[in-house]
């Protein structure tokens, strides 16, 4: 009887080598998530023991006052060093770009928006009682879109794309033309570490909430978005309560009737001790308040796709178990600890 091969441990890929293979890209993303989670756990233990820690972009300034605190802070530094060994967030972003090269989030998002007619903008006076033809031909504004964790500029590029338009009645020998935008999109892209000058460098948790109190025509008003794109970002958040906070903030950034495009690895939902596909969808609907649209039926062997609508009338049905982490699955097939915790105070 042949012996089973022992699984090989993940080894940090050498930082000096060029990122050329998808295998190495997967190693980088896996290790980045693992080390980031371990570091956050170490930070939480250190702060619980009274350590004063000031975070910077790449390292932590610490002030130990006892031997036990010093040991905890050394653990924090250890995970910082391990993150640096694999190239840090910069290498992680390059790996993410390679991992997502076989699936274009922008193509999926633009395809759905085009199907709905949202690439032509939004009616300024969206009176549902008006005839559809009148609503379609009435004045329109750009569709406002926020991309969270933008690792490329594809949606920004789509919003800036133009086409040549010839004036009616011009002949081939005497043509005059203008350029018009292909899509009526207003795209804002953010990331915790920007890779392009058009991507705003900011943590989504620090991104200002929309202003829903001032007059809708006020130039100082920060409006709610029509569309949010959160692709392969939720799984990068290292704690269950922050994942829940992210989902609740996404809901608050959307106008009623707006939609969130959400993707995450299926492994997070199918191999976790703390969650299942069914329970995750209950969190999205009964907990946060989203409606899951039919476009969420898109299938992929490795990714879970959700198109989530903020309803016109709030429909959250809070349950106490949404506010805690619990063990739902056990056994060797449930190896990861992905989970989501909601805060009742953060619900709209």
Image (spheres, grey):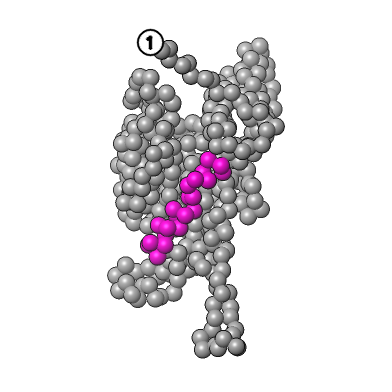
Rendered view: 249 above or below 329: below
Residue visible at 42% across and 58% down in the picture: 111
Residue 290, visible in the rendered structure: no
Residue visible at 45% across and 32% down in the picture: 240
Quickly name the residue at label 1.
Answer: 1
Query: Which of these two is toward me, 129 or 301?
Result: 301
Instruction: Name the secondary structure under disc 1.
Output: loop
User: Over which residues does the magenta segment extend?
Assistant: 97-117
The x and y percentages for residue 108 are 44, 53
Residue 136, visible in the rendered structure: yes
Residue visible at 36% across and 72% down in the picture: 135
The x and y percentages for residue 101 are 53, 46
The x and y percentages for residue 141 are 47, 68
Rendered view: 347 above or below 7: below
Query: Which of these two is toward me, 326 or 150?
Result: 150
Our reading of the magenta stretch's main secondary structure is: helix
Left or right? Give the position of 172 relative to 124: right
* Magenta stretch encompasses residue 114: yes
Residue 89 falls in which quadrant of the image? top right
């Amino acid at each position: 009887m042949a012996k089973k091969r022992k699984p090989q441990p993940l080894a940090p890929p050498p930082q000096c080598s060029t990122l050329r293979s998808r295998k190495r890209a997967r190693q980088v993303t896996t290790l980045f998530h693992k080390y980031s989670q371990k570091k956050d756990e170490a930070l939480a233990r250190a702060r619980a023991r009274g350590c004063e820690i000031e975070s910077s972009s790449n390292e932590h300034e610490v002030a130990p006052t006892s031997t036990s605190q010093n040991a905890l802070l050394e653990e924090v530094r250890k995970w910082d060093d391990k993150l640096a060994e694999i190239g840090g967030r910069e290498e992680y972003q390059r790996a993410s770009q390679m991992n997502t090269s076989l699936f274009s989030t922008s193509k999926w998002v633009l395809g759905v928006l085009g199907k709905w007619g949202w690439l032509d903008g939004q009616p300024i006076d969206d009176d549902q009682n008006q005839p559809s033809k009148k609503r379609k031909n009435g004045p329109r504004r750009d569709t406002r879109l926020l991309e969270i964790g933008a690792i490329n500029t594809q949606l920004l590029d789509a919003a800036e794309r133009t086409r040549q338009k010839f004036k009616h009645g011009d002949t081939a020998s005497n043509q005059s033309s203008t350029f018009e935008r292909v899509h009526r999109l207003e795209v804002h892209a953010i990331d915790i570490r920007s890779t392009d000058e058009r991507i705003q460098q900011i943590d989504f948790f620090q991104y200002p909430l929309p202003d829903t109190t001032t007059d809708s025509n006020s130039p100082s008003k920060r409006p709610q978005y029509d569309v949010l794109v959160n692709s392969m970002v939720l799984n990068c958040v290292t704690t269950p309560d922050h994942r829940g906070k992210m989902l609740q903030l996404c809901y608050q950034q959307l106008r009623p009737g707006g939609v969130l495009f959400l993707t995450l690895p299926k492994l997070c939902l199918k191999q976790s001790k703390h969650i299942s596909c069914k329970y995750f969808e209950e969190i999205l609907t009964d907990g946060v308040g989203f409606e899951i649209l039919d476009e969420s039926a898109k299938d992929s062997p490795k990714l879970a796709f959700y198109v989530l609508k903020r309803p016109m009338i709030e429909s959250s049905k809070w349950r106490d178990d949404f506010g805690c982490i619990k063990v739902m699955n056990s056994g060797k097939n449930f190896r990861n600890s992905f989970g989501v915790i909601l805060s009742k105070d953060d619900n709209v």
